[in-house]
Image (spheres, helix red, strand yellow):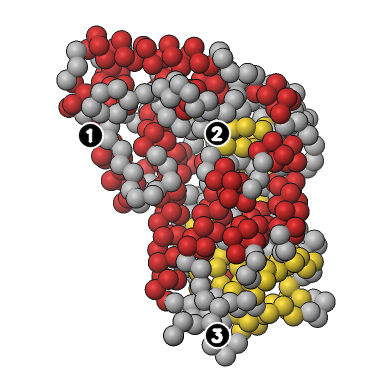
Amino acid sequence: MAAALIHDIVIVGGGTAGWMAALGLATVVGDRYRIRLVESDEIGTVGVGEATIPLIQRFNRIVGIDEHDFLRETGGTFKLAIEFVNWGRVGDRYMHGFGRVGQDLWTVGFEQYWHRMRLAGGARPLGDYAITQQAARANRFMPARPEPANSPLADIAYAYHFDAGRYARFLRKLAEARGVRRTEGRITHATRGESGDVDAVALASGERIGGELFIDCSGFRALLIEETLKTGFDDWSHWLPCDRALAVPCESTTPLTPYTRATAHRAGWQWRIPLQHRIGNGHVYCSRHVSDDEATATLLANLDGPPLADPRPLRFTAGMRRKTWHRNVVAIGLAGGFLEPLESTSIHLVQQTIQLLIDFFPDRGFSAADVDEFNAQSRFHWERIRDFIVLHYHVNQRDDSAFWRDCAHMAVPDTLRQKMALYKAHGRVTRFNSELFTETAWLQVMAGQNLLPDSFHPLAALQPEDSVHAYLEAVHRSVAASVVQMPDHADYIARHCAG
Ligand code: FAD
């Protein structure tokens, strides 16, 4: 006999994770379940997390968010790429652009012809064949134009930058309109029933909020999944040793760039996220190698304009919960784990976990098989993203600090080691199942940080060299001719989504 249905869902926390979960669930199952969200104004939110990847458009579509309203309300901008400065070597600069690089023509992928011509000395930098990279460099933006299908203008993949505080307020308005009930107050502890499952959260006001399914979005505190259920944490800091960040907004005095910048420093890196009304900045660093004072000085010395506040310190450990779903608690957001924002993946992991929860939505029986599968899939996504971030640190030729030397010499996860070995032989990159980052994403970072294969796919040698050269040049000309048709990013925002 089927177990009884759940009636009450309690979401603990009202940061990006809490309100995305509330809105996602209210949209999909809100008419059948009571959803309550508890958040504390006194504790507040982490307030960072302002750069995203293109899959956020999927979340927006499901919950019915209009792109222009969304950017107007959140002071947002468009994002075509991430520019990496000083990563392979000090002075190096490359982009990881969204979407495709080049256009496929013959038997094997475009990148294989690029590798062939590169080895023959006849290729341009990889970014010269990518519409999003070229548009980002020219500060231009427009959404993809589907016709003609073979034009680079049909390949414009993009994401957004937005103000995290405004984003949570925007989501809250939509979620409350769909029936989510919000309670403001500080939770002192959670209580567990006879089975060991969480049965309620107790507030400082004396109120007790009961439920059958609890979603822990309490941020780094991990109030339910760790403080209450002691689920355990897999620490990945031996691969990702940065453990602190300082975040500071500054005035915007420069053109509105449609990309995030990640600039490597002596023992960490600095983000730059352009919004309509300010630039978000932060320095992620390793406290074993650099003091807080030096990290602050480095951050402030590398701003575009005057700071708008004092730098705000944050501390973290890279890693994830042993189980993101344990008993009747599902952890989403920082309560589930932390990966630094180098590839803007945390909000995506929030979205992905909400999707997984919907896929494996429980009844009161909480089937162990469902929970195990949820945890296996969740771990797969986290670990593959972790590998991609570790790649950025590991593949460096910097000799200017112990931090970078340690990263270059560390033993990386086996899954990453295999990926790099495969690529090194013939430039092949495989994408397992639904792993987030595409072959092209891996290629751009590996090549951008000077990891280049010794050879190329043998089938890329079948065409005469001058034909391959002509093909690459035609792709480049087509990209260049497309970019000049795109409007300026700031003009596009002013016309469609200015706040
Ligand atoms: P929080 O924002 O911390 O929210 C926690 C909520 O729980 C709050 O509402 C709080 O009031 C509530 N709470 C906690 N304890 C209690 C209690 N006892 N009683 C009641 N309520 C309680 N992600 C990206 O995708 N892109 C980025 O560019 C990016 N940059 C980042 C930079 C840094 C330095 C950090 C640390 C993170 C970054 N992230 C980024 C991650 C992103 O910020 C988070 O994934 C996202 O904001 C979700 O946070 P959260 O909602 O889990 O936690």
Q: Position of residue 464 (x, y in %)?
A: 19, 13
- Name the amino acid, label 3: Gly
The mark nearer the N terminus, 1 or 3, is 3
Task: Tell me: is circle 1 under 8 Å from ligand 1.
Answer: no
Q: Position of residue 329 (x, y in %)?
A: 56, 72
- Residue 263 seen anywhere in this rendered image of the structure: no
Q: Which residue is disc 1 drawn over? A: 425
Do callouts 1 and 3 mark residues in contact (Cβ within 8 Å)?
Answer: no
Query: SS class of the residue under badge 2?
Result: loop
Query: SS class of the residue under badge 1?
Result: helix
**Nearer mark to the viewer, of 1 and 3:** 3
**Nearer mark to the viewer, of 3 and 2:** 2
Residue at 28 percent across and 46 percent down: it is 418
Residue extending farthest to the right is 205
Front-most of 140 and 341?
A: 140
Residue at 28 percent across and 26 percent down: it is 112
**Nearer mark to the viewer, of 1 and 2:** 2
Against 252, residue 49 (above or below) is: below
Residue extending farthest to the bottom is 194
Query: SS class of the residue under badge 3?
Result: loop
Q: Which residue is disc 2 drawn over? A: 158
- Name the amino acid, label 2: Tyr
User: Image quarter for residue 7?
Assistant: bottom right
Q: Which residue is disc 3 drawn over? A: 196
